[in-house]
Image: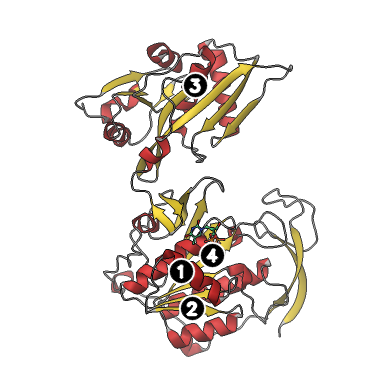
Amino acid sequence: MAKAKSVFFCQNCGFESAKWMGQCPSCREWNTFAEERVTVSAGTRKKEENRQRPVRIRDIELSADSGISTGIGELDRVLGGGIITGSLILIGGDPGIGKSTLLLQTCRNLALSGHSVLYISGEESLRQIRMRAERIGECPDRLFLLAETNLAAVRETLEREKPEVCIIDSIQTMYSDEIASAPGSVSQVREATGILMRLAKSLGISVFIVGHVTKDGAVAGPRVLEHMVDTVLYFEGERHASYRILRAAKNRFGPTNEIGVFEMRDSGLAEVANPSEYMLSGKPEGASGSVVACSLEGTRPLLVEIQALVVNTSYGMPRRTAVGADYNRVNLLIAVLERRCGLPLGDSDCYVNIAGGIRMNEPAMDLGIALAVASGFRDRPVGEKVVVFGEIGLSGEVRAVSQAQQRVSEAVKLGFNTVVLPKASMKTVKKTEGIRLIPVETLREAIERIL
Ligand code: TYD
Ligand code: MG
């Protein structure tokens, strides 16, 4: 017998509680609990003949399926090679960032290369989607649209049409009649995702789910679904900047942390083939407080400019801000500069910014941030053609980082001639023509060598 009861869910992370709470004990967000009615079934047993039996691992057949190419190189890279048949992929991001645009472009490419595609929208009318498609390019033959929000209808359509790829835009608009709570609530989005997961696996349809990242507590965010799906991609970027970054947060079929870089144009999203060049465009020449650092995003090194502005504090408390870098990390590096390198930053405001608005958290950025602050403080520029990378410890030591060779190669490719790197990483780097390697053991040594 099914029985209805009332529970409270955190709309941010999906934490479940029997009573209302002001702050979520799991994700520490305030005021995110909402009441939902859920039906608890007494547990349905599968009939004897439907039960699965254990299978020997060697008897499972491997398919040579390396994934269908989406026709967008950057998306294929983030997916780990392409779309795997029967996989469930979640694309999260702020409203208006370009999720629908990216997926419509993907659908178009897939349809043009002969795959059957169904785009189910619960947000826009068919005419609106057609208008968007017109901006992107000619509409192909095999791309079908459906405006639907009822899950039972979606399920019926998928079972009847059996497309190879299906898009659900967005999961927060889908609802099941069997669940009492409103569309977008935690129990609804979970139910919808569960149904789509079963359909994807049983029919071999690859399903993309769009999930809006929400700020208020009324609609459940994509985080509550992360554990259910095969792949989680997040679309990020500044609203006013034209580039967008697609990041894999979870991938059962490929590497995580891989990024794809796009630019929003009039005719949809365009791939950025050389992101380092793109990120460094507009770098000022001969300015103090500007350092080029190298971070590894997934398997690809990326050069970015770190800027630091150091000014005298006008009120007693020095101000520190970090845009694009981790705030606590920046404070830690400033403390190391003060204590281990003798830079009196106690009466200085420090503003650190990663140019281009990109967010980067790799420890290898430490040396770049510290040198940018030191350069800004002394008002002495770092050489034009210098790239730095290295992690900094609390004693002021510069620690080894992974993939040093790849980072050096990227610097060479973009025409830099000097690389400051951790001494411990030197043994992994080959001698390269035309590049001067400056191995350093401590932050103090790095400052002395290049400032
Ligand atoms: P959209 O894909 O609708 O965002 P989401 O589905 O993530 O909410 O993107 C909408 C934004 O993209 C909107 O601000 C207009 C812009 N855009 C372009 O600049 N060029 C284009 O060719 C298209 C289709 C959209
Ligand atoms: Mg959309």
Q: In the image shown, does 59 or 286 lie closer to the viewer?
A: 286
> Quick one: SS at disc 1?
helix
- The residue at label 4 has a CB less than 8 Å from ligand 2: yes
Q: CA distance from mark 2 to mark 1?
A: 11 Å
Q: Which residue is mark 3?
A: 289
Quadrant location of ligand 2?
bottom right
Q: Is residue 46 above or below residue 337?
A: below
Question: Tag 1: residue type?
Answer: Ala
Residue 145's tag is: 2
In the rendered structure, which disc, 1 or 4, sits on the residue that comes first in sequence? 1
Question: Tag 2: residue type?
Answer: Leu
Q: Residue at x 54, y 75 (%)?
A: 127
Tell me residue 25's x, y (percent): 72, 51
Q: Residue at x 49, y 38 (%)?
A: 356
Q: Which residue is mark 1?
A: 133
In the rendered structure, which disc, 4 or 3, sits on the residue that comes first in sequence? 4
Q: CA distance from mark 4 to mark 3?
A: 40 Å
Residue 210's tag is: 4
Tell me residue 343's x, y (percent): 55, 12
Residue 77's tag is: none
Question: Tag 4: residue type?
Answer: Val
**Relative to 49, 148 lies left or right:** right
In the rendered structure, which disc, 1 or 3, sits on the residue that comes first in sequence? 1
In the rendered structure, which disc, 3 or 2, sits on the residue that comes first in sequence? 2
Marks 4 and 2: CB-CB under 8 Å?
A: no
In the rendered structure, which disc, 4 or 2, sits on the residue that comes first in sequence? 2
Q: In the image shown, does 449 or 62 lie closer to the viewer?
A: 449
Disc 1 or disc 4, which is closer to the eye?
A: 1
| Identity of the residue furthest to the left in this view | 433
> Quick one: SS at disc 4?
strand
Q: CA distance from mark 1 to mark 3?
A: 44 Å
